[in-house]
Amino acid sequence: MPFPSLSNMPMNAPALMPARLLLIEDDPLLGERVQHHLAGQGHLVTLCRRGDEGLDAARGGGFDLVLLDILLPGLDGLSLLAALREQDGVPVMLLSALGDEQDRIAGLSSGADDYLPKPFSLAELSVRVDAILRRVRLERRRWHVPPEGQQASTRYGGLALNHDNETAEYDGCPLALTETEFRLLDALCQHRGQVLSKPYLYQAILHRSFGRHDRALDLHVSHLRRKLRAAGGSAQLLRTVWGQGYMLASELL
């Protein structure tokens, strides 16, 4: 794998405070290189080489980000992600040699926050890790202390959002949202009845620029729409406005 030599990597001070990272990777060389590189940036990195061990470690809690391979012994990465999403909203970045479009779609649809195909550069890995950690810290500050006049829990018809633990219910049925899905639903609720453009949602929710061939937002919308329908919401509750963006129909809440 064409991973750059660590000796040739610029060892700048990390832009963020140290974070607790869980790396689940069965390739010994890659695992040690990634662990060494991220630890060199000041992060605390726990390395697991089996999926079942990684799931136990992740469920122990306290991690700011999970870096997860897909092809793992003991338990594959997508099954691990599904089990983790049943009770934990920790951000997950998939690292996988399965890099074609369908594999990326499967990973993002399963609740991953990012997908980095192998082989990748350690420099790109660092940038993506920092971007997720920066978003997590901003969100924690945002939800921990609600703005003046804003309650921790907000209800929109049958839909209830709890900002303290980033959970949501529809007619009393838990939606089991990922962090990204919760942010997306929160934005749509705050602007219910209004069309939110894709460029706006990419910046506000995914914290990156919109690209014509980038389907990440579509996948998150599809996943959110499916969960709302499974809880009894109308098929027209979360609408696609072709050529414009997405809208939550306030009259159907």
Image: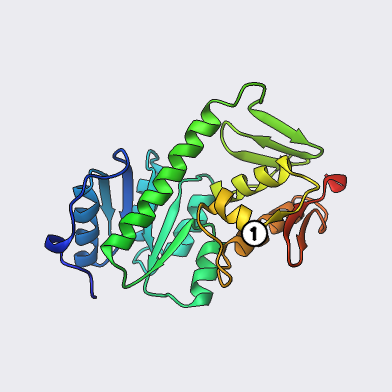
Can you see residue 178?
Answer: no
Indicate the amino acid at tag 1. Lys
The residue at the point 50 percent across, 65 percent down is 107
Q: Residue furthest right?
A: 251
Q: Which of the image's four quarters has the N terminus? A: bottom left
Give the x, y percent position of residue 205: 57, 50
Can you see residue 27?
Answer: yes
The quadrant holding residue 23 is bottom left
Q: Residue furthest top?
A: 148
Q: Is residue 211 left or right of residue 245?
A: left
Q: Residue furthest left?
A: 7
- Is the residue 196 above or below the residue 1 in the image? above
Q: Is residue 109 left or right of residue 235?
A: left
Give the x, y percent position of residue 194: 78, 49
The residue at the point 38 percent across, 38 percent down is 62
Give the x, y percent position of residue 225: 71, 57
